[in-house]
Image (cartoon, helix red, strand yellow):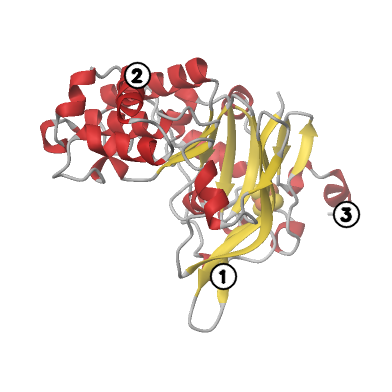
């Protein structure tokens, strides 16, 4: 698959009174066209900051520190999202990339009908009122909502329906890339499953690429093709959903998977300790205070994200032959 989004050396942080810390640290990541990439990790691991940096929506005290984010369009032209002017970026948003922020199902304006909230942006992008209405109705159909919903006010809809309206609005211009942050949090399990199925259907129907930010490994297991596991601002492991769930390499991935409740019951292993604050990252491997496999180099040397085979990457000294030989 060709690469749709190429992230290189991306660092973003928080500006404090005396210093700036890194919430996302030198992330390199290629997102393939047409895939659903799950970005997963505990609260505070930097996954939402990564999403907002991709969309260039960081707000103070958040600060972009370095990097390049190139969106490759079908015509073969790459656009570095971090270098575009505001008006150039506006042209790309909705039409080529769209964002579903965390908690967005509560962001609908309560005094406006769904139709106006869905069609305003389409009209701003040059569609006539009739075209915008027809596009909005077609987008609602993708999430199994009838066109009559356009006449409703948000308070007349359930939480699941409001979330579907938000998804429909985000995909109404058929963007190449959709970034969705904690899309199904706060929904019941049945609605969550339905919405994930609809999202997979949107990928199939529109050929869209989806980056799904979540803390929930169960969500990733249901829908993602590949998974990027984040810990303390860095990617700890990257690979196919099957590889990561069946044979996780990184001890953090192993802990996350061990924390998933199983239908068959049994003891949940869980992860000891807590993720570090970005103001107080440990030296060496940032996971070392919690790692059951720690060995000498881990406290001092930062593991690089290295390929284990062409499709699998891990940032752990256990898989670095050079470090293991020195230890
Ligand atoms: Fe554990 Fe060391 Fe690997 Fe970090 S580098 S995950 S501390 S074994």
Residue hosting label 3: 326
Point 15% across, 44% down: residue? 110
Q: Residue 96: x percent and y percent? A: 54, 36
Q: Which mark is residue 278?
A: none
Point 29% across, 17% down: residue? 144
Q: Earlier in the sequence, mark 1 or mark 3?
A: 1
Residue furthest toward the front? 128
Q: Quadrant of residue 198?
A: top left
Say whether residue 209 is left or right of residue 308: left
- Secondary element at tag 1: strand
The quadrant of the rendering that contains the C terminus is bottom right
Q: Quadrant of residue 172?
A: top left
Say whether residue 139 is left or right of residue 326: left
Q: Nearer the viewer, mark 2 or mark 1?
A: 2
- Compared with 105, 138 (above or below) is above
Q: Is residue 213 visible?
A: no
- Secondary element at tag 3: helix
Category of crowding for the residue at label 1, using alpha-carbon neighbours closer than 10 angstroms: few (below 14), some (14–19), many (at least 20): many
Does the residue at mark 3 contact the one at mark 2 (Cβ under 8 Å)? no
Q: Residue 90: x percent and y percent? A: 50, 48
Q: Nearer the viewer, mark 3 or mark 2?
A: 2
Say whether residue 285 is left or right of residue 210: right
Residue hosting label 2: 138
Q: Residue 7: x percent and y percent? A: 67, 46
Residue hosting label 1: 21
Q: Earlier in the sequence, mark 2 or mark 1?
A: 1
Q: Residue 147: x percent and y percent? A: 23, 19
- Secondary element at tag 2: helix
Q: Earlier in the sequence, mark 3 or mark 2?
A: 2
Residues 177 and 221: in front is 177
Q: CA distance from mark 2 to mark 1?
A: 44 Å
């Amino acid at each position: 698959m060709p690469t749709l989004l190429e992230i290189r050396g991306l660092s973003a942080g928080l500006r404090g009174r005396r210093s700036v810390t890194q919430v996302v640290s030198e992330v390199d990541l290629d997102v393939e066209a047409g895939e659903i990439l799950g970005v997963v990790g505990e609260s505070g691991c930097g996954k939402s900051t990564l999403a907002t940096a991709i969309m260039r929506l960081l707000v103070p005290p958040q600060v972009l520190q370095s990097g390049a984010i190139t969106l490759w369009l079908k015509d073969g032209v790459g656009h570095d999202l971090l270098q575009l002017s505001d008006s150039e970026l506006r042209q790309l948003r909705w039409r080529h990339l769209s964002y579903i922020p965390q908690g967005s199902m509560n962001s609908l304006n309560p005094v406006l009908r769904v139709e106006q909230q869905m069609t305003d942006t389409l009209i701003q992008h040059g569609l006539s009122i009739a075209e915008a209405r027809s596009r909005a109705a077609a987008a609602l159909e993708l999430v199994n909502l009838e066109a009559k919903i356009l006449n409703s006010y948000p308070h007349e809809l359930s939480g699941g329906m409001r979330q579907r309206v938000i998804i429909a609005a985000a995909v109404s211009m058929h963007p190449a890339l959709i970034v969705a942050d904690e899309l199904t949090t706060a929904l019941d399990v049945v609605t969550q499953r339905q919405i994930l199925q609809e999202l997979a259907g949107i990928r199939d129907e529109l050929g869209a690429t989806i980056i799904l930010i979540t803390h929930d490994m169960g969500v990733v297991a249901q829908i993602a093709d590949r998974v990027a596991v984040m810990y303390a601002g860095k990617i700890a492991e990257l690979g196919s959903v099957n590889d990561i769930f069946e044979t996780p390499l990184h001890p953090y991935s192993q802990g996350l998977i061990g924390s998933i409740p199983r239908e068959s019951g049994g003891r949940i292993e869980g992860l000891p300790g807590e993720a570090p604050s970005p103001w107080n990252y440990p030296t060496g491997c940032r996971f070392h205070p919690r790692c059951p496999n720690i060995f000498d180099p881990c406290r001092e040397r930062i593991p690089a994200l290295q390929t284990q085979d062409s499709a699998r990457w891990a940032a752990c000294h256990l898989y670095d032959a050079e470090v293991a030989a020195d230890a």
